[in-house]
Image (spheres, helix red, strand yellow):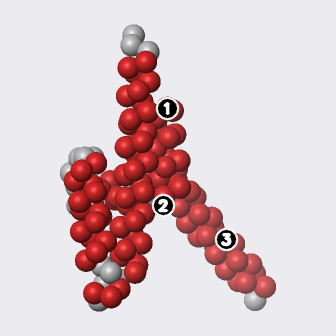
Amino acid sequence: MAKYIAQIIVLGAQVVGKAFARALKQEIAASQEAAKRAGGGPQGAKRAAANASSGLTLEEAMQILNIDKIDPEKLKNNYEHLFSVNEKAKGGSFYLQSKIVRAKERLDIEIKDKQSSDTQKQANPS
């Protein structure tokens, strides 16, 4: 009887160990893929920090605000429209409003970074 219990415990530990190893490999692969998409290097580190601070990726923020490219004027118009449409008094959702605000914050970070890099390029033409 004890022999069977020991076999069950050993088999259970092997199954859990294999599942853990597989999950770890998948997480490493996903992390590497995310690093590739972020661009790597200092620019990728900035983008990863912005994603972490806002909780949204650049792509998600653009989808939420329904824009194809980062245009400050279109960003402002879409933000104002979506924010007002989702007001609680009009039957909207506070959750959606908060997602809209976070998306605008994320895109504002990207615009600010782009402007500062453009300023640096103008100051130090190579």
Q: Give the image location of residue 99, x and y in percent.
A: 39, 69
Secondary structure of the residue carrying tag 1 is helix
Q: Quadrant of residue 98?
A: bottom left
The residue to which callout 2 is attached is 55
Mark 1 residue type: Gly
State the separation of the CA atoms marked 3 and 2. Answer: 36 Å
**Answer yes or no: do the residues labelled 1 and 3 have beta carbons within 8 Å?**
no
Q: Could you tell me if residue 34 is visible in this image?
A: no
Query: Which x, y percent locates residue 73?
Result: 24, 50
Question: Going by the image, does 66 lie left or right of 89?
Answer: left
Task: Give the labeled residue for mark 3.
Answer: 13
Q: Determine whether the residue tagged by mark 3 lies in a helix, strand or loop.
A: helix
| 67 versus 43 height, above or below | below
Q: Amino acid at mark 3?
A: Ala
Residue shown at the point (48%, 58%) measured from the top left: 54
Q: Residues within 10 Å of mark 1 (few under 14, many from 20)?
A: few
Q: Write down the residue under mark 1.
A: 41
> Looking at numbered disc 2 in the image, what kind of residue is underneath it?
Gly
Of tags 1 and 3, the one toward the viewer is 1
Q: Residue furthest top?
A: 126
Quarter occupied by residue 84: bottom left
